[in-house]
Image (tube, rainbow, N blue to C red):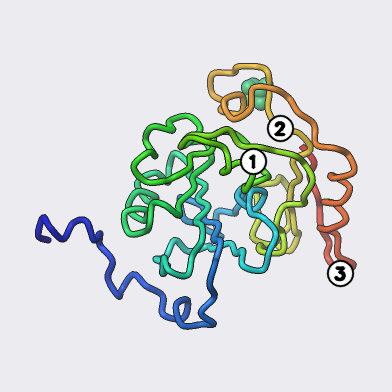
């Protein structure tokens, strides 16, 4: 690749999913993504669905494919330590001014993301718009506990965490009833995300349980 072409990234037709581009030409998309890319066999726990706002222009993408920047308002990227390289490669091919990052890696090492995102969110967040309204590139996530996570964008069946004695057809999911921890165990990053223990209002927990219950599902809900 010529030096002058590097600024255009590595976008090739091979990396673009045509059905995504031509489907219904959605505009103003807000796309939630998780890095490393989701592997359903390993099970998912996409915290980004807590961050994604209301609206039918909002989606959660399981594939870290290339999107058409012109159709997208925001990319909301949750980056784990193991997904950093994958994120960088993807971010180089997209408009930095539309990329928001959050999660463990951006919270601990925000300076690593200054080149790739216009907002770097530290800690938990459930109010995306108020959070990104704050001045500066690195901002603290705002949580106001008014909304149920966007389970409608996501199949709870994918959330197959490792639960002892879980049978293949059992559907298992979890609800975070609190966040943070005041202790400092060496191996744990929870206090870095949130150094105070904050409980979710019980009414919101109830709404979340009600949302997840369906008459036909045999589901176990873990509260933690
Ligand atoms: S959440 Fe993490 S820091 Fe807090 S007690 Fe448990 S392991 Fe230790």
Q: Which of marks 3 and 2 precedes in the sequence?
A: 2
Residue matched to label 1: 125
Quarter, ligand 1: top right
| Callout 1 crowding tier (Cα within 10 Å): few <14, some 14–19, many ≥20 | many
Residue at 38% from the left image edge and 57% from the top image edge? 95
> Across the whole image, how many numbered discs are drawn on residues?
3
How far, Cα to Cα, is label 3 from label 1?
Answer: 32 Å
Q: Nearer the viewer, mark 2 or mark 1?
A: 1
The quadrant of the picture occupied by the N terminus is: bottom left
How far, Cα to Cα, is label 2 from label 3?
Answer: 30 Å
Write down the quadrant of residue 140 in the picture.
top right
| Callout 3 crowding tier (Cα within 10 Å): few <14, some 14–19, many ≥20 | few
Q: Nearer the viewer, mark 3 or mark 1?
A: 1
Q: Is mark 3 within 8 Å of ligand 1?
A: no
How far, Cα to Cα, is label 2 from label 1?
Answer: 11 Å
Q: Vertical placement of 69 versus 97: above or below?
A: below
- Contact check, label 3 and label 1, Cβ < 8 Å: no
Residue matched to label 2: 179
Horizontal and vertical percent for residue 148? 77, 51
Horizontal placement of 20 versus 142: left or right? Answer: left
- Contact check, label 2 and label 3, Cβ < 8 Å: no
Residue matched to label 3: 216
Horizontal and vertical percent for residue 60? 58, 62
Q: Vertical placement of 50 versus 4: above or below?
A: above
Identify the secondary structure beneath mark 1: loop
Q: Vertical placement of 155 versus 149: above or below?
A: below
Front-most of residues 66 and 26:
26
Write down the quadrant of residue 186 in the picture.
top right
Q: Is mark 2 within 8 Å of ligand 1?
A: no
Front-most of residues 115 and 211:
115
Identify the secondary structure beneath mark 2: strand
Horizontal placement of 144 versus 114: left or right? Answer: right
């Amino acid at each position: 690749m010529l030096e002058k072409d590097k600024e255009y990234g590595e976008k090739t037709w091979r990396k673009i999913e045509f059905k995504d581009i031509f489907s219904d030409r959605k505009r103003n998309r807000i796309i939630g993504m998780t890095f490393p890319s989701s592997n359903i066999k390993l099970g998912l726990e996409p915290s980004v669905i807590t961050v994604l706002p209301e609206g039918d222009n909002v989606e959660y993408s399981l594939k870290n494919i290339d999107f058409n920047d012109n159709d997208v308002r925001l990319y909301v990227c949750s980056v784990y330590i193991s997904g950093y390289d994958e994120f960088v490669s993807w971010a180089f091919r997209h408009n930095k001014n539309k990329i928001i990052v959050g999660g463990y890696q951006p919270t601990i090492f925000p300076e690593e993301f200054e080149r790739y995102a216009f907002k770097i969110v530290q800690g938990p967040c459930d109010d995306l718009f108020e959070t990104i309204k704050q001045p500066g590139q690195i901002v603290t996530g705002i949580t106001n506990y008014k909304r149920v996570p966007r389970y409608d964008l996501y199949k709870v069946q994918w959330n197959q965490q490792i639960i002892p004695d879980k049978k293949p057809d059992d559907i298992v999911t979890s609800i975070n009833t609190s966040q943070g921890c005041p202790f400092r165990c060496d191996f744990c990053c929870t206090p870095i995300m949130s150094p105070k223990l904050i409980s979710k209002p019980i009414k919101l927990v109830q709404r979340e349980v009600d949302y997840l219950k369906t008459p036909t599902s045999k589901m176990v809900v873990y509260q933690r």
